[in-house]
Image (cartoon, rainbow, N blue to C red):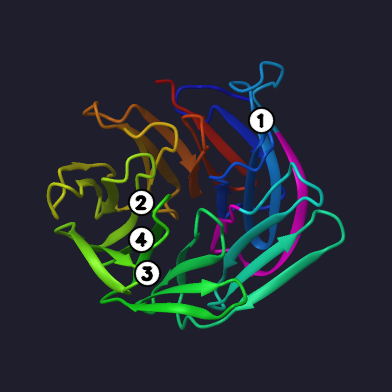
Amino acid sequence: MEDSGRGASYTVHCDDYVHVVEFSPFDSGSAASLLAYGGNQYVVVGTCRFQKEDAEVDGVEFTTLRVYHHVLRVDCLAWSPESRLDKLPQLIRFCTAAADRNLRLMTSDLQNTHEVKVMAGHTSYINQLVFEPTEGKQIASVSDDHTCRVWDLDGSEATIFRLRSPGVSVCWHPEDIFKLMVAEKKGTIRFYDLVTQQAILSLESGQSPLMSADWCLTNTIKVGAVTGSDWVIWDITRSSYPQEKRPAHVERAGTFRWSRANENLFSTTGCPGKINSQLLVHHLGHPQPVMIGSAVVGAGLSWHRSLPLCVIGGDRKLSFWMTEM
């Protein structure tokens, strides 16, 4: 475990290249956090404990619960709120997307039962997935095929929203289960009402390409995104144009994610594929990034559900950055 300024606070070694990594944002009934990571034909599900949570842990303790075979490389992954470790049988449920344009709903009891439900419908690359956060009975996905689709768990399409450009990000409101945020590459973010199936509000970034957007789930009037090499933040009660905008990365920015622990904390990454992709952690009260992490070809970005800590994947490792606030 190394902790040098720009290096990761903690690292966990993996057997293969990590293409996606996601902390579960939900309470699984365990003191440890559920974490899934995936890459070429595999997904690993495990639990993480950190020194900040348990003084007896040396940095980070990762315990593998199960390794899943996955037909193709995993391109994105989302956790279901139904995943529980405190009841028997235990339940692990998540959804993946891959280059065959299909979603795969994976359900396991970590013993003998393991089900895979393939959901077909998208006609191009899928960029993000999210489960309905209260009960997990639906999944939303966005794609380069200019659609956002809402799926029931049996694989049927409940709703299709036609977009005007590729769908890059999708977020579900944490309490109001009928509100969905969809971000489009050409720079527009729309909020949809799932009952009326109409757009109820739209935001404009004023520039493109918009590569990634996120809804601040601890304070839902805030939306953030990366467009070009900048980060932008809206207060949706005030204007359809951003309240704040700052250059973040030398080259194009790739991902924007709000912290789940602090509504003023967020992170951005440069586009993967550069030899050194920077991870920047920003605080709304500070003009400069509060942390700059140097990650070699990082992929995936996810925040812990209660600590100011984020993870990115890389070549045979997970890198964790703790932000001291």
Q: CA distance from mark 3 to mark 4?
A: 6 Å
Graded by Cα atoms within 10 Å as few (under 14), some (14 to 19) or many (20 or more), the crowding at tag 4 reads some
**Residue 321, position as x, y percentages in the image:** 50, 31
Q: Secondary structure at mark 4?
A: strand
Circles 2 and 3, Cβ within 8 Å, touching? The answer is no
Residue 182 against residue 245 in the figure, above or below = below
Earlier in the chain: of badge 1 and badge 3, it is 1
Circles 1 and 2, Cβ within 8 Å, touching? The answer is no
Residue 133 on the magenta span = no
Q: Secondary structure at mark 3?
A: loop
Earlier in the chain: of badge 1 and badge 4, it is 1
Earlier in the chain: of badge 1 and badge 2, it is 1
Residue linked to disc 3: 194
Image point 24% across, 55% down: which residue? 228
Residue linked to disc 4: 179
Magenta residues, start to end = 62-81
Q: Nearer the viewer, mark 1 or mark 4?
A: 4
Circles 4 and 2, Cβ within 8 Å, touching? The answer is no
